[in-house]
Image (tube, rainbow, N blue to C red):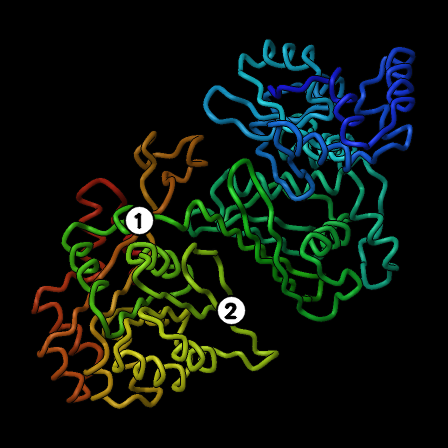
Amino acid sequence: MSKFSRKTIGDLLLEKGIISYPQLEQIKFEERQTGESLFKVVPRLGFMTQKEMVEFIAQHTDIPQVELANMMIDPEIIKLVPEELARKYQIIPVLRIGNALSCAMADVFNIYAIDELSAKTGLTIDPMIATEDEIKKAIDEFYIVQGDMGGVIKTLDEVKLDIEDSEHVDVVSLKGASEEPPVVKYVNFMIAKAVSDGASDIHIEPEEHVLSVRFRIDGILQKQENPPKKFQAAISSRIKIMANLDIAETRKPQDGRIQTQLQDRRIDIRVSFLPTVYGENIVMRLLDTSNILLGLEEIGFDKETLSQLRGLLQKPNGIILVTGPTGSGKTTTLYSSLSTINEPKKSIVTVEDPVEYRLPGIRQTQVDPKIDLTFSNGLRAILRQDPDVIMIGEIRDVDTARIAIQAALTGHLVLATLHTNNAAGAITRLMDIGIEPFLLASSIIAVLAQRLVRVLCKDCHGKGCKLCSTTGYKGRTGIYELLIFNENIRSHILRKSSAEEIHRAAIATGMQSLYDNGMSKVKAGITSEEEVYRVTQ
């Protein structure tokens, strides 16, 4: 706790010239008469606003300030403090680390509240200061009936609201509906549950009489409890407000971004709205920085492939391509690779669409077609920045490919992604868009193809249990094939051999195929043969 107490804060306000001595006496009188804390009295008397009071305390004590407006709190954390106790003391749990529970409080010097909370939870309480209004709003939003999705949906059902067709409702009504506490609760809880379940995407899909919600977990869409259809417009508007989008626009696609905090994890959410005959289809891509910043050894590489890849990443120049379909983990591999080679003596620059995660020490550029900042134009500018390593989010056209090759041939290490089914397919794909074989043979040093396979649940070993939602799988890992260019492969490229011929030549020189790499994980008890077959066929 801070060296200051609620009894001496008033003196500190006097010392700093915030209030006069008569005002201090008035504050003390009001405290005695009303029983209210200094945190209530000072704003009520108009000497400081709640926000100013909170900032003052945070500045002059060792108690941290927390902003609750854009924070998603884990439902499991909320369950630690009974709602009755939270409302009694204007307190809300935010984060648990070990035996310590960080709680946002309006009156951080209320020893009785801290002692009762500690006795109730059995945890050490670390106070954090926030405004009373923020805490009240957070309590209303995060304390859910029954503490599950069914309870949240029940609160929606009890609200009388009927604005299903947002095209014929005014903006004021839409905004009002989106700010209804049950609507806010539902959206917040849905996002928190998706993150807790390890979902990569949330799909909100309007049908004629139903508003369907599905989470993509471990690459597979799984149905969730559906909210009432009548709340379709309100839920849509709530998400638009969070993403700073136009709630009145329902006829055109919209894309936005939400940044929030869930416990100690920063969650970036990419939001896409697409008009359909039954309303706007919403897809929310959840980007968790704690999941992306993994080391190469943590994403499924076997020892030999990992050793080979680490050696390639130390090359001073050349192109390393990462290929696979959408959702195969290419971005994770690229970011993990950059983190591996990121050091003060290297200049690393990226051009991405979009920048999914901020990497410390790396200059990241996001393409923007509205200002003609394309991959190719961004690359041209990057080459004038004296980089050592360049990462290209995706090679989409011949111009981008040619500039990447130019960069590799002029002494830069280039990492890029390409959408092909296997490693050899990347070569023929680049030939098809107009890249000369001799340029490919002289610039590319390796192609890494990959897929993500689901991992067998450690509790039930694939049988299905509560932990894995009866799927038999929990989590995912990568399977890979690494095509390293040698003279044999280069000769095939110069002869314009087919992808099948190049693939067979690579296998003959020791490359392990995606399927074979997957089957090695089957033998190790990591995944199943059905799962490997699913992602490789």
Task: From the image, tell me which residue sits under label 2.
Answer: 366
Residue at horizontal 54 percent and vertical 16 percent from the top = 124
Relative vertical location of residue 236 with respect to residue 191 in this rendering, above or below: below
**Residue 89 appears at what percent x and percent y?**
74, 19
Q: Nearer the viewer, residue 521 or 115?
A: 115
Secondary element type, mark 1: loop
Residue 154 visible somewhere in the drawing: no
**Residue 223 appears at what percent x and percent y?**
55, 45
In the image, which disc is placed on residue 295? 1
**Residue 165 appears at what percent x and percent y?**
81, 58
Q: Quadrant of the N terminus?
A: top right
Residue at horizontal 79 percent and vertical 22 percent from the top = 10
Secondary element type, mark 2: strand
Q: Amino acid at mark 2?
A: Gln
Residue at horizontal 71 percent and vertical 36 percent from the top = 55
For marks 1 and 2 on the same chain, the one whose residue lies earlier in the sequence: 1
Mark 1 crowdedness (10 Å alpha carbons): few <14, some 14-19, many ≥20: some
Q: Is residue 457 left or right of residue 273?
A: left
Q: Amino acid at mark 1?
A: Gly
Relative vertical location of residue 520 with respect to residue 40 in this rendering, above or below: below
User: Cβ–Cβ below 8 Å for labels 1 and 2?
Assistant: no
